[in-house]
Amino acid sequence: MVVEDVTPLRAASAALEDLNQSLEVRVQTRTRELEDANRELQNEIVRRELAEEALRQSRHELELLSQQLIQAQESERRRIARELHDSIGPSLSAIKYSLERGAELHRQARHEDALPLIARIIQRVREAIADVRSIAMNLRPPVLDDLGVASALEWLSREFGETYSHIAVHTHIDATDADIPSHLATTIFRSAQELLNNVAKHAKAKHVSVTLSRDTARVSLLVCDDGIGLPSPSASGSFGTGHGIRNLRERAQMHGGKLTLTSDQKAGTIARLEWAYAAARDP
């Protein structure tokens, strides 16, 4: 009879089994770590692709904005050239001819005949001065720089009411010139100008109101009319895609603001532009 002690063998077997289990756990742990790392890498790839797409979209929008800016500049230059050609040009030509005629009458000692001609020259000079002042005011009214946007909106509303006498203009300026940050002045003025032009051209309104206000939270420009409203919103819920509305929205967004349009064919259109006051303050 042979007796053999297998205790060391069992101990070695148990140790081997424990080692195998430990190795399996380490393998599983490492596998999970690799899977997590792989998912994180895939998520990072997706994030980078989204960021690259957003960058491409931003570049595309910037290119479109640059094109629109160039088109707007060219359009404004054409308008100024046309006004100069159509109004100032003929006036200066008539003044030149009248002065030449007056000089000829003076040379002939026909002073009595020259007096009515001089009166007409003075009148034409006054008209030319008025035309130049009108062109300059359309480009940028001095009141915007001399006083501020609140006063400029008062002037703009008066000018609009005199030009379009069939539309009653109601102005509510609840802010002073000093209340509005200077870097918003041009944006607010041009936005109000664009909105009033839209009312005159498209709204068929009888009344329009312009409101400028500022509180501790925001700066707001509100233009409301009782006209026929905007075209029905698109599937995305936005009103129109014309250059005017897009320019207004981009003009507001340039300084962290937003444009909100509410329109009803029975109640007219409400255009609201708002800027958070903390973001709108001058740096």
Image (tube, helix red, strand yellow):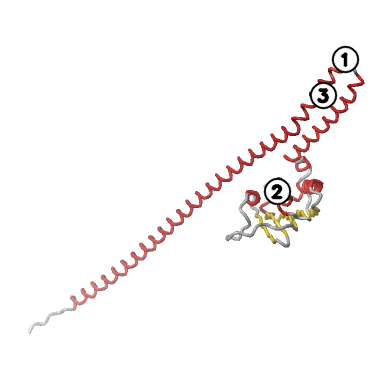
Find residue 272 and report its horizontal and vertical position in percent. Answer: 70, 56
Find residue 95 and report its horizontal and vertical position in percent. Answer: 80, 26
Q: Name the residue under label 2.
A: 194
How crowded pointer 1 is (Cα within 10 Å; few <14, some 14-19, many 20+) is rated as few
Q: Residue at x 83, y 32 (%)?
A: 126
Sequence-earlier tag: 3 or 1: 3
Q: Name the residue under label 1.
A: 108
CA gap, disc 1 and disc 2: 55 Å
Say whether residue 220 is left or right of residue 60. Answer: right
CA gap, disc 3 and disc 1: 15 Å
Say whether residue 118 is left or right of residue 220. Answer: right
Which residue of the protein is positioned furthest toward the right in this rendering? 112
How crowded pointer 2 is (Cα within 10 Å; few <14, some 14-19, many 20+) is rated as some
Q: What element carries label 3?
A: helix
Dot 1 amino acid type: Gln
CA gap, disc 3 and disc 2: 40 Å
Q: Examine the rendered structure and indicate whether residue 228 appears above or below residue 118.
A: below
Sequence-earlier tag: 1 or 2: 1
Residue 79: assigned label: none
Q: Quadrant of residue 24?
A: bottom left
Say whether residue 122 is left or right of residue 228. Answer: right
Dot 3 amino acid type: Ser
Q: Mark 3 points at which residue?
A: 98
Q: Which residue is drawn at 92% across and 21% down?
A: 112
Observer-side mark, 1 or 2, equals 1
Q: Residue at x 21, y 74 (%)?
A: 13
